[in-house]
Amino acid sequence: MPYPKYDPNAPMENRFLAALPPEELERILPKLEEVELKFGEKIYERGGMIEYVYFPTGSLFSRLAVGPDELTLEMGVVGREGMMGYPVFVGDSRSEFRVIVLGSGKAMRMSAADFKAVCKQDVTLRQMMLRFGQLRFMQASLASACHRVHGVEKRLIRWLLMTSDRLQSDEIPVTNTFLSFILGLSPKEATAAVDSLKKRELIRYSKGCFEIIDRKNLLASACQCYTLIRNEENTYPVPVTLPA
């Protein structure tokens, strides 16, 4: 059964698309279809073909670098401020990362072929894609640097804050096991870091959900990597907003 086409009269929840000029957005809308995505669902495999590009409206995506023995490390988180399928824009049909759904919810998608066509035609879309690519590259670079120079606790704090920003919520539904997978940690390392933040009364964790309970002090404990990413995002045409 085919997915429904996106309703052009519905509010535009993906802020990347909402920032486009009306005439460019009107050309894109008929090519979109709305999909419901589930937590943990794989959207792209590293080296796999990209058939669709995705614009999150309520879902959240994680880009994972995959190493030997299936070791993974998250290279970035994308929500309503962005899109998935960037390689299509630069002429590549294969994904350089494994992409999974980090937060269940809806997204709009369009075929890679249609996306290539509108990128050739629409100037503002191309400009925004170039800027988004820069932000995307910075996220990946700082994630790699953070993994190399900072301890497990700092890396966990960075991830919690970045994910919370995109969900616009202090509640982050993810299991401890899944957290260790995307951060490239052993379950023991992940548990120790979570327990440390709980003892400091910065977060709660219960039944597969983290809750930030002291954002001010969690921010004070964050590494510079998070600050650098936030500063870069503040110059992005579609800023990542903080939780209300």
Image (cartoon, rainbow, N blue to C red):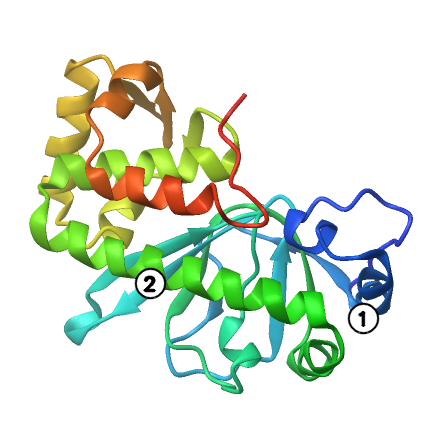
Amino acid type of the residue that numbered disc 1 sits on in the rendered structure: Lys
Confirm or deny contact between disc 2 and disc 1 (CB under 8 A). Answer: no
Pointer 1 residue: 31
Residue 27, position in %: x, y? 85, 69
Q: Secondary structure under badge 1?
A: helix
Q: Is residue 4 visible?
A: no
- Can you say whether 150 is above or below 84 in the image? above
Amino acid type of the residue that numbered disc 2 sits on in the rendered structure: Leu
Quarter occupied by residue 55:
bottom right
- Can you say whether 149 is above or below 110 in the image? above
Pointer 2 residue: 64
Q: How many marks?
A: 2
Quadrant in which the N terminus is drawn: bottom right
Quarter occupied by residue 3:
bottom right
- Can you say whether 216 is above or below 15 in the image? above
Residue 189, position in %: x, y? 10, 41
Q: Earlier in the sequence, mark 2 or mark 1?
A: 1
Quarter occupied by residue 115:
bottom right
Q: Is residue 153 left or right of residue 143?
A: left
Q: Which mark is residue 130?
A: none
